[in-house]
Amino acid sequence: MGVPLTQILIYLLAVVILAAVVVRVRRTSQQQGYRFGRDVIVRCRDGHLFMTTWIPMMSFKAIRLGLVRLQYCPVGEHLTAVRLMRDDDLTPAERLAAGRHHDNGVP
């Protein structure tokens, strides 16, 4: 007595829907100029810039709220809301300043 076919189809449909949502979110975000992966620049609520790992739909050290996360800021040494920054919105000096501060690298 194995798993009923309808249950397998429901799981398969859920996986397909989840994959479609992930692809859609990633494509839309990249079209808006956001970058994902390691060493992306974020700005905390107090204006501090630092680099972190940002993977859509995944985080172990932060609470996700769309393009905003509650996360530890290594610059101000506080827990705060951080948001993903577009490269086009940053000056070369801001990119350099952000490069001096990295979090622990875990998404």
Image (cartoon, rainbow, N blue to C red):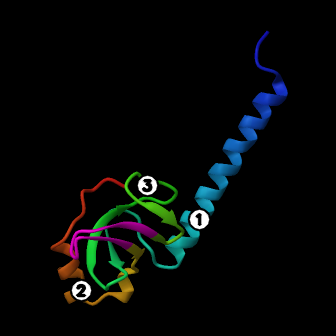
| Rendering coords of residue 60 (x, y %) | 40, 51
Mark pair 3, 1: CA separation:
15 Å
**Disc 3 versus disc 1: nearer the observer:** 3
Q: Amino acid at mark 1?
A: Val
In the image shown, does 45 or 26 lie closer to the viewer? 45
Looking at the image, which residue is at 45% across and 74% down?
A: 34
Q: How many marks?
A: 3
Residue at the extreme top? 1
Which residue position is annotated with label 2? 94
Residue interval drawn in magenta: 69-80
Give the quarter of the image for residue 46.
bottom left
Which quadrant is the N terminus positioned in?
top right
Main SS class of the magenta portion in the image: strand
Please rate how many residues cluster around mark 1, counting C-alpha atoms within 10 Å: few if below 14, some from 14 to 19, many from 20.
Answer: some
For badge 3, the amino acid type reads Ser
Lower sequence index among marks 2 and 1: 1
- Label 3: which residue? 59
Relative to 47, is 39 above or below?
A: above
